[in-house]
């Protein structure tokens, strides 16, 4: 039997927030024997600084983090990193193309415009998650997913500034999926 949970957060009536990452679609399904498959779509609203930076040679790195989390009523929740999916976005001025590269598979795509490149950057389809420990099934555990978009390498003064400003990076709110 295959279980399916779909969470859609891309409602048409919601005002878009500037400089943010939002989960437009998110789903995890269970395939026998206890194999988790996920698909998601992220929506990016880049700051002017990041847009201009892309055109001037910055490489942006997207990290989608999957964390296994056990709820604890007496103390802090216990967390265990499950997997991080990294994808890069860069602009090639000679060809006037945006390039998206997924680091784990080395797949790359080229796009003539930024919206199409951002759509590919935020899409993860039928991704097989690593095996979840046996004690996570039916044990008050969940998978917590977040996404961040940062410049691939910041020089030291900007690295310190990035701690106090969202100008240099974007971060999503998390999505929680309880493991049945």
Image: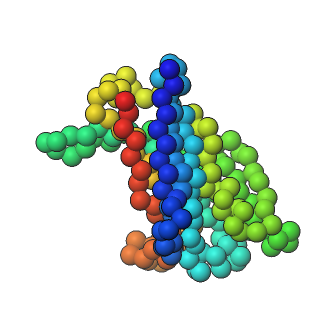
Quadrant in which the C terminus is drawn: top left
State the image quarter where residue 80 is shown: top left
> Depth check: 44 or 5 in front?
5
Residue under the image location 56 percent in, 48 percent down: 40
The image's colour scheme reads: rainbow
Residue 104 x %, y %: 64, 43
Question: Quick check: 61 above or below 113?
Answer: above
Residue 170 x %, y %: 49, 67
Residue 68 x %, y %: 38, 39
Residue under the image location 48 percent in, 68 percent down: 14
Residue 44 x %, y %: 57, 65
Q: Is residue 142 left or right of residue 107?
A: left
Q: Can residue 20 be seen here?
A: no
> Depth check: 9 or 19 in front?
9
Q: Is residue 32 left or right of residue 134?
A: right
Q: How many marks?
A: 0
Q: Seen from this angle, which residue lies furthest front?
A: 13
Residue under the image location 70 percent in, 77 percent down: 56
Q: Is residue 122 left or right of residue 70?
A: right
> Depth check: 113 or 97 in front?
113
State the image quarter where residue 114 is shown: bottom right
Q: Seen from this angle, which residue lies furthest left?
A: 74
Q: Can residue 174 be seen here?
A: yes
Residue under the image location 65 percent in, 65 percent down: 59
Q: Seen from this angle, which residue lies furthest right?
A: 95
């Amino acid at each position: 039997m295959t279980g399916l949970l779909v969470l859609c957060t891309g409602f048409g009536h919601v005002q878009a927030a500037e400089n943010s990452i939002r989960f437009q679609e998110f789903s995890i399904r269970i395939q026998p024997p206890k194999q988790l498959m996920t698909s998601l779509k992220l929506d990016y609203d880049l700051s002017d600084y990041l847009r201009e930076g892309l055109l001037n040679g910055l490489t942006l790195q997207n990290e989608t983090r999957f964390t296994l989390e056990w709820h604890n009523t007496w103390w802090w929740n216990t967390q265990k990193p499950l997997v991080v999916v990294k994808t890069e976005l860069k602009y090639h001025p000679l060809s006037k193309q945006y390039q998206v590269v997924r680091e784990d598979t080395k797949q790359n795509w080229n796009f003539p415009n930024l919206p199409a490149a951002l759509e590919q950057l935020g899409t993860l389809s039928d991704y097989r998650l690593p095996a979840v420990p046996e004690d996570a099934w039916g044990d008050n555990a969940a998978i917590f997913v977040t996404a961040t978009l940062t410049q691939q390498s910041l020089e030291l003064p900007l690295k310190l500034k990035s701690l106090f400003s969202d100008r240099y990076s974007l971060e999503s709110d998390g999505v929680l999926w309880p493991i049945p």
